Amino acid sequence: MVKIIPFKAVKPTRAIVGLVASRPYQSYTLDERESRMAYNPYSFLHVVNPGYKYAQEVTGEERYKLVKNRYLEFKEEGIFVQDKKPSFYVYKIVNRHGQEFSGIIAATSAEDYENDIIKKHEDTIAKREETFKTYIQTVGFNAEPVLLTYPDNAVIANIIKETQKGYAEFEFTMTYKDTHYLWKIDAEDIINTIQEEFKKMKTVYIADGHHRSASSYLLYKDEMVKNSNHNGSESYNFFMSFLIPESNLVIHEFNRLIKDLNGLTKEEFLIKLDGFYRIENRGIIPYNPSKPHHFSMYLDGEFYSLYLRKTAFEFKTALDELDAQLLYKTILQPILNINDLRHDNRISYVNGRHEMVTIKSSVDSGEFKVGFGMCPSNVEQMKQIADQGLTMPPKSTYILPKLRSAITIYEY
């Protein structure tokens, strides 16, 4: 039984929401951040990068306190306004490629996370969990929802469709050419219907935002212990999520670039590779794999297709079936001696929205020696891995939609 509740979102005003909303802080280069802040006084980047005001870098607890100050200033200046009534929010994104993503922004339960009703498929780093927990504990808000996916539901789909026929509270396009729409649902009968439909679901799955979920759970545990009058309704019992149906989720792969062949010559490398794969030289024409367990490889100016030999690998779990794991177990670890996919500086990742020519260019530049392309995984694989209590290797999925910060804000 999945528990979601409406909440009183803090939001930018309609007139300036397009100026306020931003990509996640870490996705900007330093030059990009400073350029946006120099010309846009409304950007949420001013809140999360408070040192800009004093022309210096501020870190740790000092930064968190200044973030809270900037946030309160935005509220005092009327840039942010809190809704008076708890609501759900229907949110739609149309990206620059015409792909549409529609779902519901709601507060989801930290207890559901604890009880594995909200399921995970990625490992998290404890230090990052603690850092973000301390951050939200200090600033008192979260401005970017976790992306969750749920089984397609006709009742919820109809509510979203009917809501979108009405006047959108927000409708704006960002410089990246993605258009955002937001509708508010505050009618109690519709809120109750949505909640009842989610109660019928056994599980939902984290698509993106594993660290934010884990940190919110740590916050919940901390605050529950400190509160002698804890009753389960406090804001720290929940965290903001954007829930979309499984059919609306788009998953791309992350392709791999490797800086060297682990001391092997090209010929020695191909011979070792032959133990796992049937290899075919495809020449200079870019090649993309067509089905799972097939890979493309670019090496020394030529493309190759790699077809897994049927007896070369034993599939025991859902994780074994994942191409990112298969590549790791048959090539990256045993042949190229890459054991730590998260920290080894010999490996880099390129999301699958880029063509194979990106792999080619990176290798041809001399920065990398070999590149590998794969097919994307799918929602069912992600769910099976989560259901078996397993976790994907780092950079296994590049998931859409990508969300903006500060369109809705959840306060603790």
Image: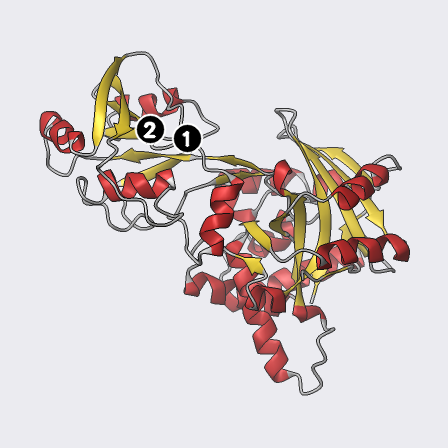
Q: In this image, 304 relative to 7: left or right?
A: left
Q: Position of residue 94 (x, y in %)?
A: 68, 31
User: Which quadrant holds residue 262?
Assistant: top left
Q: Name the residue at 66% across, 44% down.
A: 244
Q: Is residue 133 above or below residue 208?
A: below
State the quadrant of the N terminus: bottom right
The kind of residue tagged 1 is: Cys
CA gap, disc 1 to disc 2? 8 Å
Q: Is residue 344 above or below residue 357?
A: below
Q: Which mark is residue 282?
A: none
Task: Tell me which numbered mark, 1 or 2, is placed earlier along the sequence.
Answer: 2
Q: Which mark is residue 294?
A: 2
Q: Can you identify the residue that label 1 sits on?
A: 375
Q: How is the image coloured?
A: secondary structure
| Residue 66 in view here | yes
The kind of residue tagged 2 is: His
Secondary structure type for disc 2: strand
Check if mark 1's residue and mark 2's residue have beta carbons within 8 Å. yes
Q: Name the residue at 22% across, 23% down.
A: 279
User: Which quadrant holds residue 82?
Assistant: bottom right
Q: In this image, 294 relative to 63: left or right?
A: left
